Structures are given as structure tokens and as C-alpha cells.
Image: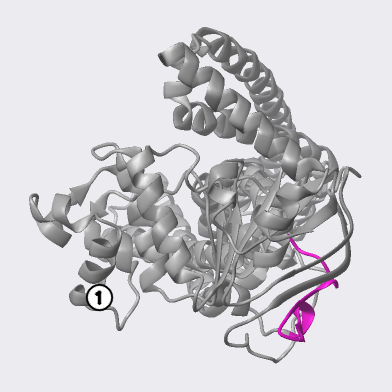
Amino acid sequence: MINKALYKFCGNTKKYIYLAVFAEILRLLMGIAFAFVFAGLIASVIGGESPQLIMVAIAVATIIFKIIFTRLSAKYNFKVVREVKHNLRTGVYKKVLDLGMAYQGVLTTQEVTHLGVEGVEQLENYYGGYLTQFYYCFASSIILFIVVFPIDVLSAFILMLASLLIPITLQAIMGIVRKTQRKYWNKYSDIGNLFLDSLTGITTLKIFEADEKRADDMDDIAEGFRKQTMKVLAMQLNSIVIIDWIAYISTAVVIGINVWGYVDGKISVVSVAVMILLAAEFFIPMKALTAKFHVAMTGVAAGERILDFLEYEEIYESGEEVFPNEADIEVKNLSFSYPDGTEVLKDIDVKFESGKFTALVGRSGCGKSTLASLVCGHLKTPEGISYSGVKKSNLMRGELEKNIVRITHDPHIFAATVRDNIVMGKEGIDDAQVIETLKDLNMWAFLEGERGLDTMLLSGGKNISGGQAQRISIARALVSDFQVYIFDESTSNVDIESENIIIDMVKKLSETKTVIYITHKMSVVSLTDYVHVMKDGLIIQSGTPEELIEEDGLYRDLHREQEDLKSLYDKRKS
């Protein structure tokens, strides 16, 4: 009934669990003391005596101490929850950083967000209530058995066995409960992930008038979640009814035995009163455990998903070497297939030299972006890629992220200042360096008319143009001084002016860095030093633009197609 893997996340807070249990035990002892004092007061009233003031004071004191120990237990449970939440969220965050872009091969961004937020919250009941209650239940049963045994042996054994029957019953239905709760959490995750995905793409849904269809999809998933919730509630109700019957029947039997003993003159009125009060006390912890059990199992289902993510191990090991300066990238006999079995790259042999402006071209779907993802480490492959002779598998973990940057057509602009968007928290980058980079990208004149580096940008760069957003993302990459720059369709959605500025900058950059430029625009390709042409996952041509234009092949076909389109456009425009 205790998940050992989740228990290890308690860390240093295990002491607070024990302290919470101890506080509950002290509360129980106050309850036992109250039972004896109250029973004595009842005996005094029945015997025609006036209740002693000291007895009343003790009864009131026990009640006050019960309240104090209850609050103390809640305080310790809160400390457990606070640290465990921090440990789990830190673990998820570090795992995402550790995996890099490869985390998306395990969970989607929406799933990671849902697990890190709502998944961790679901575990609050497990750590903040269930664990303490679990240990306390057994401790309370033993203490109460010791107290009741001298009063009536038979009653003590009946209450003890009946109270132990409750966790045995819970253990018996554990498999069914976990299966049901796992389905509940999956349904809950599905609706949460769909909602986050819909919220992210709400503009697209509105533009294409697909919001109503998406709303219907959410209704269907919500209905499935409602039905699963009803199953969970029905299961909880049924188990609580069973536990209640065990408690009520056992309590009634014990009360009957003791009342009968009192009638026969074998038991005093004090003993009967104590037994009646403590018989109920026997089952209060177990009933609380039952209530927390079902809620906690929902958290366990979420916790298992978190553990699966945290325990995910990459099959590729890292080494101890650092990334070389002025790295020539060499790909040999590289093949790659996605997890669904789709083969994307076949026996790739290609080299990207430092100090050269190298283009990678081909029709859509030929494998250009996949090759780029493998080179920069966003996708994993055991062998086939080396950097100036250093195999990818021999590099220290994190070296690829530190030295290779991939700039796509849709960079993310954060809701922050221009400075924060470019520097990204890195130390050693001063304003003068940022401004100089922005001048090279012909961006500083615009920003100077605003608030300079303190100009606030909206999330997604909604208050600047697409070309400006792209130039800021390139400035971000330039000031970080990477060894390898991969431009993956980075000018596909910018205006001509921005494109020309970016191309001039890339040509200058390629003089000292390794630059891979992926594009469909053949007019840009003609400005590069070297070109690799891909088709169906293969490198079918390599050479300078001047050499390839003379060959009868795909490069010439792509070039002529774009020239024909340009001529047709110019004719229609004229």
C-alpha cells in the first residue's frame, strides 16, 4: 500500500512524517485520557455524586491538547508536501534539461506541463495525508489494544481483528483501485493536454473555423472523463460502505458484550463507558485511511507517470571529450528511422567544413531537417557523426547544446525586454556587444527609436514584424558565440529586406564558424560556397553551385523550377 519509488522523494522530510505520526499518537493519548475522565464523570453522576472540578479541568485540558496536536500534525504534513512538490518539480525540470529537445520523444510539451503542475498537485494527498495516516493506523490499533485488553480481553481481540480487516480489505482491492485510478488519470491528462493544445493554437482554430469541431472533440473527451469519474466515485462509495459495516458491526458487538457484562455485574460503569468511547476510536483512523486511500491512489497514478519520465534512460552514452574549436562535421554511413519504423536517412556520407558557407537543399520531406536535428543532438543516434574527429558518443553530456545552435523559421520571443530575449541570462555579455550585433543585423535603428535594449516585447513577438523577430533570434544566437550554426529555413517567412540582411550576416559568419544553411530558395543557395543535395533520404549531389548548375540533376531542376516561377510571376505583375 506504500509506493517505494514515490516514497524516496520524501528526502529529508521523512522526519516530518514520523513527527506527524507522533503528534497523532499524542492526540490519541489525549483522547484515551478524555475517555477515562469522561467515564469517571458519568460514574459520579450515576452514583449521585457531584463531578469533581479537577476532573472537569482535566477533560477540558485533554480537548485543548487534542486540538494542539492535530494542528501540529497538519503543520508537519504541510512541510512534507512543500518539500516533495519542490523535489518532484525540480526532478521533472532537470530531466527536461538533461534530455534537451529529445524529451519530446518521451512526452509532448503539453504532457510535461500537465505532469509538472497538476500531476504533482495530485500527489499532495498521498504525501500530506495518506502516508501519515497509514503509519498512524497501525500504531493506534496497537495502543488501543493495550489499553482495552485489561478491561475486556474478548472486546480487545474483536476490535483489533476488525480494525486490521480494513487495511486487508483495501489491499485486496488494490489492483482494481489502481487500474481504475490509472484510467481516471489518463482521461484527466487527455482532457488537460487537449485543452492546452487548443489554447496554444486558438488563433489557427479561429482562422480555419475549426474551433467548433475542436469544442466537440473536447466535449467527447470530457464525457469520457465524466463516466470514468463516476466509476471512481462508485468504487469509493462501495468500499466505504463495506468498511463502515465492519466498523459498525464490530462496535455494536463490543458494546453489547460490555453492556451484558455490566448487567451481570462483571464490568463497572466506568469500564463500559470507556469501552463505548474507545470502540469508536478504534475505527476512526481506519475510516480516515479508507477515505484518503482512494484520493491518494489518483496521486499514485499521476506519480507513476512522473516516475516513468524521470526514470527514462537514453540508450546512448556520453563520453568525456569537449567539443573542438572550428569543428568540421563529418557524417559517415548514417541511417536513421523514427520509432514508428519510418526510414528517413539512408547511408548518409557528407561533410560540413568550418569556414565555409554550406547549403543543404532538396524537396520537402527528403530528410534535411532530420539530418540537422541529428547533427545538433535534438535527435539521438549512436554512431555516424563526428566533429573534427571527435565522435558524437565521446562528447561530454551537454557539449552539443553549448556549441551547436539551430535557428528555425519560428523562433520564440519571450514576453521580456530585448536585452533579456537576446542575453537569455548568460553572464559576460555586455550591452555594447548586443548593440553591435543588432547594428550588424540592421535592427538597432528601429530599437533606438523605441527604448533601446529595454524595449518590451510581447510573447511570440506580437508587437514586431516577423523579420524583426527573426533578427532578434539570430542576435540571440550570435552573442552566445556557438561553434556551429544551423539555419533551418530561417528566412522562409521574412521579407526581402530582412532576408538580404540575414544572408549578408550568415556569409560573414561562415568565415569563422561552421555554417549549415537549409533552404528551398535557390537564389540564396547560389551565394554559398558548397552545396549538398538530398532526395529520399540520400545525398545525391555535392559540389559548388557553379559545378552543380552544369550537371544534369536535381539541383539544376530545382533552380530552373524557381526561375520559371519567378518569370511567370514577373509576367503577371507586368
Looking at the image, residue 343 sits to the left or right of residue 207; the answer is right
Q: Residues within 10 Å of mark 1 (few under 14, many from 20)?
A: few
Looking at the rendered structure, the number of numbered marks drawn on it comes to 1
- Observer-nearest of 179 and 87: 87
Q: Position of residue 487 (x, y in %)?
A: 54, 56
**Residue at left offset 83%, top offset 43%:** 552
Quadrant of the frame with the N terminus: bottom right
Residue 453 in sight: yes
Residue 482 vs residue 130: left or right?
left
The answer to whether residue 231 is above or below residue 136 is above
Q: Observer-nearest residue: 58 or 97? A: 97
Range of residues picked out in magenta: 379-394
Q: Residue at x 30, y 46 (%)?
A: 468
Q: Quadrant of residue 395?
A: bottom right
Nearest to the observer: residue 123 or residue 427: 427
For mark 1, what is the residue?
433
135 is higher (above) or lower (below) than 185: below
Res 341 quadrant in image: top right
Q: Is residue 2 visible?
A: no
**Image coordinates for residue 355, horizontal then vertical, percent:** 56, 77
**Quarter placement of the C terminus:** top left
Q: Residue 435: percent from the left, percent from the top?
A: 21, 68
Q: Amino acid at mark 1?
A: Gln
382 within the magenta span: yes
Relative horizontal placement of residue 161, taking residue 11 as reference (left or right)? right
Q: Going by the image, does 197 lie left or right of 424?
A: right
Q: Residue at 79%, 41% (x, y): give it.
A: 554
Its colouring scheme is one colour
Q: State whether residue 327 is above or below residue 99.
A: below
